[in-house]
Image (spheres, rainbow, N blue to C red):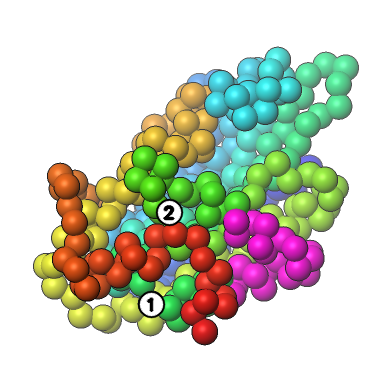
Amino acid sequence: MLGRVTTYLQDLQDKICAGLSAADGGKAFQQDSWERPGGGGGRSRILRDGAILEQGGVGFSHVFGEQMPASATAHRPELAGRNFNATGVSLVIHPRNPYIPTSHANVRFFIAEKPDAEPVWWFGGGFDLTPFYPFDDDIKHWHQVAKNCLHPFGEELYPKFKAWCDEYFYLKHRGETRGVGGLFFDDLNARGFEESFAIMRAVGDAYLEAYLPIIERRKNTPYGERERQFQLYRRGRYVEFNLVWDRGTLFGLQTGGRTESILMSMPPLVRWEYGYEPEPDSPEAKLYQDYLRPRDWLTELD
């Protein structure tokens, strides 16, 4: 199982980096290969100061160890006392133009084992979109691709994974969603290995189909200092979520992963402003009023 999954994930990293590099006009990703002292390693790829992408990180990792970290056993107490293998691809893209949304995707596979017991394994993943100046057509496209990629596995999966995404990427301390969502799933194993693996592959393969058309539509949209400053302010919410709520960040740090690779999701520039309130009836206010809450994007935007 593990060999098939890691081969797919490495190929997926190659495919996504090639697609994003082409969208940026050929700017290349820099690769850092690394080893984890406790077992395993990965390869982190970063594109910086591109024509379109201010910074993007696409990382592959495969780490293993003798003891599950606290973040994992808190989520799954039955895993205490097991060793683990964890492998995945995770990416965050921060475009320069405020009219192009930030995007995130992740697909992953876990195996937890101990002597004289059956292995416990599962898949997880998803992708989500964080616009600063939303366009309804972009949001509908993003969610339509999400729905389409899951359709072969049953009509119930998209609404389930969409709601899970809204719940997971919610900043409880702010009372708002991180963006307009997409898909999120975890602990996927009930359908057996082959179908669960196929679902994970469908989600991973759909990311470029969902994101590249949005880049193409918005990359030449004019913007000024006002839009840039709002983008930098809203990027602060991304930092807050990753450092306060994200289980993946915590798992990586607790397992002794490479810190630079774990935190490559952070934006290159960001700002905070005390007590910020958008001007009434402004495009910035519209983001708060209409978009930072769960909605049925495929019907409400018709």
Q: CA distance from mark 1 to mark 2?
A: 17 Å
Q: Which residues are magenta?
A: 144-163
Q: Are dots 1 and 2 in contact, CB under 8 Å? A: no
> For residue 162, what is the image quadrant?
bottom right
What amino acid type is highlighted by mark number 1?
Phe
Q: Which residue is mark 2?
A: 177
Mark nearest the camera among 1 and 2 is: 2
Residue 186 in picture, x, y percent from top left = 66, 44
On screen, residue 132 above or below 34: below
Q: Label 1 neighbourhood size at 10 Å, few (<14), some (14-19), many (20+)?
A: some
Residue 135, label in figure:
1
Q: Residue at x 88, y 17 (%)?
A: 116
On screen, residue 80 above or below 108: above
What amino acid type is highlighted by mark number 2?
Thr
Q: Residue at x 22, y 50 (%)?
A: 270
Q: Residue at x 72, y 33 (%)?
A: 111
Residue 6 seen:
no
Q: Is residue 251 magenta?
A: no
